[in-house]
Image: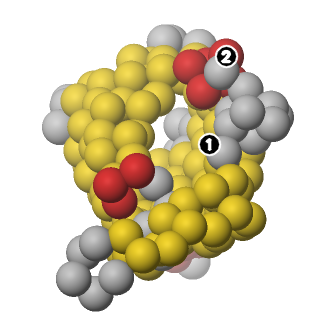
């Protein structure tokens, strides 16, 4: 009987050890300092899936009237190519939904311009970026991201493309 109780307690203890969740942070918040400096603050949330991948959502909005962008929402997926957990060099695929204010041209089917309008317009796009993420032992992060995206619904940016530039600081928790 004592042997059965000992085995049962050992099994329960083993299960409790293996069922413990990791203490490693899996969430990150960051602020794009470059966009914030020009009046278009961008706040990003990133969820770490595993050592090599994460997904997230960035949201930027205009604070100044001279910026023609009302807002942009950018969900993304990142794959990291480093031995460090969700850090180092990465590639990012992203999508976007944005609202643009101001003037823009309507295009004809043959590619020429045939109209001009002023007001708000909403568009969507897809893009690709590369970047580098640095993480400190205290879980502070620094990001540098460069990429380009292309509008696929309602061309709201010049020539249908727009940059993805991020120089950001953040914190994992």
Mark 1, secondary structure of its residue? strand
Which quarter shows the C terminus?
Answer: top right
Query: In front: mark 1 or mark 2?
Result: 2
172 sits left or right of 93 in the view:
right
Q: Tell me which residue sits at (59%, 49%) in the image.
A: 58
Label 1 to label 2: alpha-carbon separation: 16 Å
**Residue at the spot of label 2:** 37
Against 9, residue 47 (above or below) is: above
Q: Tell me which residue sits at (56%, 19%) in the image.
A: 34
Which quarter shows the N terminus?
Answer: bottom right
* Percent of width and height locating residue 129: 28, 43
* Percent of width and height locating residue 39: 73, 26
* Disc 1 residue crowd, few under 14, some 14–19, many 20+, Cα 10 Å: some
Evaluate whether residue 21 shows in this view: no
* Percent of width and height locating residue 91: 24, 44
Q: Quadrant of residue 86?
A: top left
Q: Tell me which residue sits at (56%, 67%) in the image.
A: 116
Q: Quadrant of residue 172?
A: top right
Evaluate whether residue 117 shows in this view: yes
Q: Give me the disc on residue 44.
A: 1
In depth, the one of 15 and 51 nearer the eye is 51
* Percent of width and height locating residue 159: 33, 55
Against 146, residue 73 (above or below) is: below
CB atoms at circles 1 and 2 under 8 Å apart?
no
Mark 2, secondary structure of its residue? helix
């Amino acid at each position: 009987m004592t042997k059965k109780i000992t085995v049962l307690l050992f099994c329960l203890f083993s299960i409790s050890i293996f069922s413990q969740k990791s203490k490693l942070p899996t969430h990150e918040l960051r602020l794009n300092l470059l966009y914030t400096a020009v009046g278009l603050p961008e706040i990003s949330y990133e969820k770490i899936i595993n050592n090599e991948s994460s997904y997230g959502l960035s949201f930027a909005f205009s604070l100044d009237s001279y910026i023609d962008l009302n807002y942009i929402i950018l969900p993304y997926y990142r794959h990291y190519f480093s031995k460090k957990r969700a850090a180092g060099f990465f590639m990012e695929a992203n999508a976007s939904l944005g609202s643009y204010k101001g003037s823009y041209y309507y295009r004809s089917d043959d590619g020429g311009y045939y109209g001009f309008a002023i007001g708000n317009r909403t568009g969507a796009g897809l893009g690709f970026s590369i970047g580098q993420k640095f993480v400190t032992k205290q879980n502070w992060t620094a990001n540098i991201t460069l990429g380009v995206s292309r509008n696929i619904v309602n061309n709201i940016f010049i020539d249908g493309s727009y940059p993805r530039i991020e120089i950001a600081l953040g914190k994992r928790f």
